[in-house]
Structure formats: C-alpha cells, structure tokens
Amino acid sequence: MDFTKYIRDVEDFPQKGILFKDITPLLQNPEAMKSAMNGLLKMVEHQKIDKVVGMESRGFFFAPILAMRLNAGFVPVRKSGKLPADKISHTYVLEYGTDTLEMHSDSIQKGDKVLVHDDVLATGGTASATCELIENLGGIVVQCNFLIELDFLKGRNRLRPYKIASLLHY
C-alpha cells in the first residue's frame, strides 16, 4: 500500500519552519491503518519482545496494539508531570527546543526485551532519551520502530547501535 497518500504535510507546525508529517489521515482510514499495523509488526517478527514502549503522544496510536499483537506489555513514556507513580526522567534536545520524558520506575524489569515505537523518527532525541530510560531500568532495546523516518534529519545517527526499522522514508 502507498502510505504516502495518507500522510498530510502541515507547514509551520508546531513552529515556523517545521514541516509536520500528520498521520491522522492514515488513522482515519481503516484499511491504511490495518496495513500500517501489519507492516510495523512484520518489521519485528521473529523477535521475542517483553514490552513495547510508546512515546507521548502519537506513539500511543500503534504501540499498545503492537504490544497486544506481540503478547507483550505496553509502557507509556510521557512528558514531565503526567505520570502518577514513582518515575525516572530524562531531559533531551529535540529539533525545536528541549523536553523531558518520564517513565514509571517499575515499568521495565531487568532483562526485559523492549521494542521502542513512535510515529516519526526526526532528529532522534525522543527515541534516544527513551532508550536511555529503558536501559537505566535494566531493559534491553531490541529495536526502534517508526511509522515514518525523516532521513534528511539523520536521527538514525543518534540511535546507534540500536536496530532501527521504519515503514516510510522522507
């Protein structure tokens, strides 16, 4: 399936100079969403996954479904101040500022094999920060999965030595 026709470009969002890749048209089409989910699953097939970590907020669209289909737990990574229990945090630089991510401190057990999922790999800051949180809790990052990778931003470079898989490349 040609997913590009379901990705909308939004200029100057969230700030001037950014070309945002909006996946909501894909989410509104059941066949495109199902096909995307199958593609994301195929990228991680034959790997043992204990937890799927999805980043706020668009990582929450597919990560829980991936977890269910992989018979794994789902772990949300949220922005600062959104999680109610004991948590760990990491502040990082992204393409238009800084942000802090948090994860419950009991969400990953030592030795858990973890799939990291988000909608877009841009500069790699969010995924890199998430991988650091996982590893700080003793988890093993098996792969970083993305719906879209913006190749020109070279986010893949920040994620060495992790295995990276993306359904679409721009």
Image (cartoon, rainbow, N blue to C red):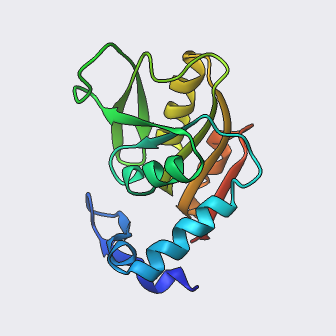
Q: Is residue 149 visible?
A: no
Residue 153 left/right relative to 85: right
Q: Residue at x 62, y 40 (%)?
A: 158
In the rendered view, tell whether residue 87 sits above or below residue 72.
above
Picture coordinates of residue 99, whole percent (x, y): 34, 34
Picture coordinates of residue 22, whole percent (x, y): 35, 69
Picture coordinates of residue 75, whole percent (x, y): 44, 35
Q: Which is nearer the eye, 161 or 56?
A: 56
Residue 140 left/right relative to 52: right
Image-quadrant location for residue 169: bottom right
Quadrant where the image shows the C terminus: bottom right
Quadrant where the image shows the N terminus: bottom right
Q: Residue at x 51, y 24 (%)?
A: 133
In the rendered view, tell whether residue 83 sits above or below residue 64.
above
Q: Residue at x 50, y 31 (%)?
A: 129
Q: Residue at x 61, y 17 (%)?
A: 138
Residue sticking out furthest to the top: 86
Picture coordinates of residue 72, whole percent (x, y): 56, 40
Q: Which is nearer the eye, 51 or 141?
A: 51
Residue sticking out furthest to the front: 71
